[in-house]
Each structure stands twice: as structure tokens, then as C-alpha cells.
């Protein structure tokens, strides 16, 4: 059974009507698409950070002569993003003024 966290911006019944539900658990689309998935979800900061991390790791591995490891490390980073996707989206909502209700 899926678990969700509820994020609300503001107070009162209107805020509850606009509540954001974030699925808690592993995200296969985050694994498959990485930063693009976060862009689609509206998590611009997280997408930029994930893209920057993957770019920095790729450049570092290229400079060290370990370019053959880039796909594996990229998959590992996307796997970790998939594991923490709910927490990352919740953090992004918190940055936009939402608070965790449940």
C-alpha cells in the first residue's frame, strides 16, 4: 500500500483544498529519467542540483580517465534520487512555503 505525505500552504479550508500529496517510497520514473522527472514535478532546484551533481561527477571521472564508469555512476545517482524522491519533493515544497501536515 502506498503512503503519502500531505503538504499545505496557508491556513483554513481553502489551504486544505489545495493540499499537495507526495508519494513516499521509491520512484521508478526518478530512476529512469533523473533530473528531467524533477523538472516535470516542478522541483526546479532539485533538478538543477541533480543535474549539476551528475555533470560534476562525469567531468571528474573523465579527468581521471575513468570515463567507462560514467553510466554506472549516473545510474547510481538516479537510483539514490529514486529512493529519496518523496523527501526531495517534500523539501522542495517546504522551500516554496508549504508545511508538512501528515
Image (cartoon, rainbow, N blue to C red):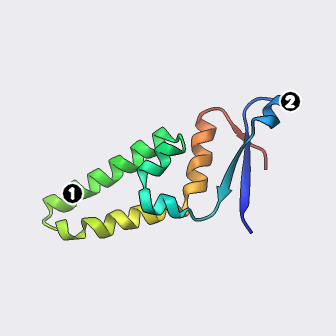
Q: CA distance from mark 2 to mark 1?
A: 50 Å
- Give the mark nearest the N terminus, 2 or 1: 2
Residue 24: x, y in percent? 66, 59
Instruction: Looking at the picture, tell me which residue is in the foreground, 70 or 1.
Output: 1
Q: Horizontal placement of 29 versus 68: left or right? A: right
Q: Horizontal placement of 86 versus 6: left or right? A: left
Q: Identify whether 102 is placed above or below 77.
A: above
Q: Residue at x 52, y 42 (%)?
A: 43
Local secondary structure at mark 1: helix
Count of all numbered marks drawn on residues in the image = 2
Residue 21: x, y in percent? 71, 48
Image quarter of the N terminus: bottom right
Residue 84: x, y in percent? 55, 59
Label 2: which residue? 12
Q: Picture quarter containing residue 76?
A: bottom left
Local secondary structure at mark 2: helix
Q: Identify whether 59 is placed above or below 41.
A: below
Q: Is residue 81 visible?
A: no
Q: Alpha-carbon neighbours of circle 2 within 10 Å: few (<14), some, or many (≥20)?
A: few
Q: Is residue 84 visible?
A: yes
Q: Residue at x 60, y 53 (%)?
A: 87
Q: Horizontal placement of 39 versus 73: left or right? A: right
Label 1: which residue? 60
Q: Horizontal placement of 68 versus 10: left or right? A: left
Q: Residue at x 40, y 42 (%)?
A: 48
Amino acid at each position: 500500500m502506498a503512503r503519502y505525505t500531505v503538504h499545505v500552504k496557508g491556513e483554513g479550508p481553502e489551504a486544505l483544498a489545495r493540499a499537495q500529496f507526495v508519494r513516499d517510497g521509491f520512484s521508478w520514473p526518478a530512476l529512469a529519467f533523473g533530473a528531467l522527472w524533477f523538472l516535470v514535478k516542478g522541483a526546479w532546484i532539485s533538478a538543477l542540483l541533480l543535474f549539476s551533481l551528475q555533470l560534476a561527477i562525469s567531468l571528474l571521472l573523465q579527468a581521471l580517465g575513468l570515463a567507462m564508469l560514467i553510466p554506472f555512476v549516473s545510474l547510481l545517482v538516479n537510483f539514490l534520487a529514486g529512493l529519496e524522491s518523496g523527501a526531495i519533493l517534500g523539501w522542495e515544497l517546504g522551500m516554496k512555503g508549504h508545511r508538512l501536515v501528515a
